[in-house]
Amino acid sequence: MLEVVKVRANWLRRRLRRVAKRSRMLRQIHHLLVSGDQRVRFEISELRTRESSSRGDGVKPENMIWIFGSGRSGSTWLRSMMGEMNDHRFWEEPMVGRLFGEFYARAPNENLRSAHFIMGDPIRKEWIRSIRNFVLDGASYSNPRLGAEDNLVIKEPNGSIGAPLLMEALPESRMILLVRDPRDVVASTLDARREGGWNFEKHKDVLQTEGKRPPKKDSLNYAERRARKYLLGMGNAKLAYDAHGGPKVLVRYEELRADALGTMKRMYSSLGIPVSGEELARVVEKYSWENIPEEEKGEGKFYRKASPGSWREDLTPEQAEMVERVTAPLLKELYPEKV
């Protein structure tokens, strides 16, 4: 009988210690909330993250769908349709590809060969794992209400320079390579960036502060710069696509424009994601070009033409020839019929 009492007393002491420990934690949280301490958001986020980890919640790599390619290629349209689907959420341009991709691309070869360099090839396995954890943590923080089985659509065309690193770090994830004729991309970008264009107006104060002038409509120099940017981003996205062993699909903007519903069905089938045909038809109709208000469409606006091949009207012959020469490797591979 005495032994039984001792066992129960020990158990009770352990329980009391646990309760006291939890009480101290609750008092600390209460103090932070009442005091308005700036640490409170971080502390609560940490607690939520630990709680989610203990439940096995958070973003699953296999439920991540990356959209890579280039800007002005229809990525906003595609993301809008996908984000409207049941069990889909979207992460709008986290720029994580740009963060790691540009740093890695600019590193001298002697740095890449060194284990002392933070992204040196001798320690590649370790920092690729760090990129994986960084992305998964960031996705969880940015999407705290993401369900365990929800798909996370990540719009990352302007981070495509880092696509090979991201796909290496997250080989289970799904990838969409969204491509558009580089001549149309350059024409659309030029329209947005020149004086009066939506992008120029959005960043006008910053540009004026930095003393930068908008490009002229017939600027050959600007056409070349944008073409080289396309070649780098789309080129890296294509490298990632070719190497990726997980579910993937190549979607051409021109096909999406001609038959959005059929292209979306093919896309989801290739990605191995079951969707409702009725729901797919609904979102395609909702975000169709015809349903965009007329006052929101036109020259200088975000929704400009949606007319593949209109670069013939927008670019000078010299600009078109420049873009074709710079992007020739990708044009031959992605649009052999147009070269």
Image (cartoon, rainbow, N blue to C red):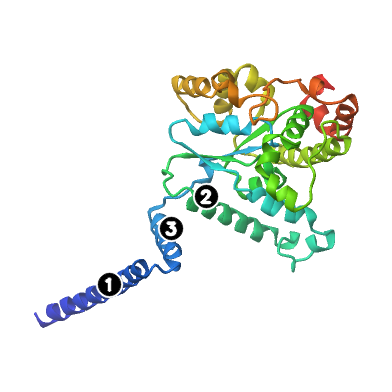
Which of the two residues, 13 or 51, is positioned nearer the viewer here? Answer: 51
Q: Which residue is mark 1?
A: 23
CB atoms at circles 2 and 3 under 8 Å apart? no
CB atoms at circles 1 and 2 under 8 Å apart? no
The answer to whether residue 77 is visible is yes
Q: Residue at x 49, y 19 (%)?
A: 281
CB atoms at circles 1 and 3 under 8 Å apart? no
Which amino acid is tagged 1?
Ser
Question: Please, what secondary structure does the residue beneath circle 1 have?
Answer: helix
Q: Which residue is mark 2?
A: 139
The quadrant of the rendering that contains the C terminus is top right
The quadrant of the rendering that contains the N terminus is bottom left
Q: Residue at x 68, y 42 (%)?
A: 158
Which of the two residues, 43 or 337, is positioned nearer the viewer here? Answer: 43
Question: Please, what secondary structure does the residue beneath circle 2 have?
Answer: helix
Q: Earlier in the sequence, mark 2 or mark 3?
A: 3
Which amino acid is tagged 3?
Thr
- Gap in Å between the C-alphas at discs 1 and 2? 31 Å
Q: Which residue is mark 3?
A: 49
Which of the two residues, 192 or 125, is positioned nearer the viewer here? Answer: 192
- Gap in Å between the C-alphas at discs 2 and 3? 12 Å
Q: Residue at x 51, y 19 (%)?
A: 285
Which amino acid is tagged 2?
Ala
- Gap in Å between the C-alphas at discs 1 and 3? 20 Å
